[in-house]
Image: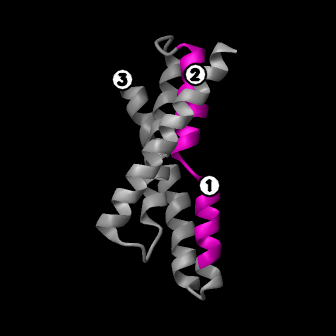
Amino acid sequence: MEQLVYIALLGALGCLCRYFLSGFVYQVFGTSFPYGTLAVNLIGAFLIGLIMEFSVRSAAIPPTLRFAITIGFLGGLTTFSTFSFETFRLLEDGALLIAIVNVLVSVVACLTCTWIGIMVARAL
């Protein structure tokens, strides 16, 4: 039960971070492309690579904390559903090229960020 409380608390924190961070990114870069969603997903991809790889190689992050961070915080921070909805809206609005770019950039960049996170963890 204690683990569920930690997951829920960090999940709420992740949601708030997503709200404020994506809002800030949209203010800076505009809304012509889903920059805010991309930003939170890139950050989350890097962090999950870093945390999971580090926790596999070290006992410094106990499982309860790892679950709270990855399932809770990063689950609240990142958003595949918003990515899907925004991409669908782009397609629906006839912005096929922007939708394709969004999918390609999101997938390739998130995988790259995860890999970078893993490489950073291995260097620690």
Point out the frontmost of discs 2 and 3.
2
Say which element carries label 2. helix
Q: Amino acid at mark 1?
A: Phe
The percent coordinates of residue 90 (x first, y second) are 58, 79
Residue ID for mark 1: 80
Q: Tell me the number on the disc at residue 6.
A: 2
The location of residue 101, given as percent across then percent down, is 51, 74
Q: Is residue 113 above or below residue 1?
A: below
Q: Is residue 76 magenta?
A: yes
Q: Provide the residue span drawn in magenta.
A: 62-89
Spatial separation of the CA atoms under disc 1 and disc 3: 29 Å
Compute the Cα span from label 2 to label 3: 26 Å
Q: Report how far apart the C-alphas of labels 2 and 1 lie in the structure.
A: 22 Å
Foreground residue, 19 or 62? 19
What's the residue at 58%, 62% (across, down)? 83
Identify which residue is drawn at 38% across, 51% down: 21
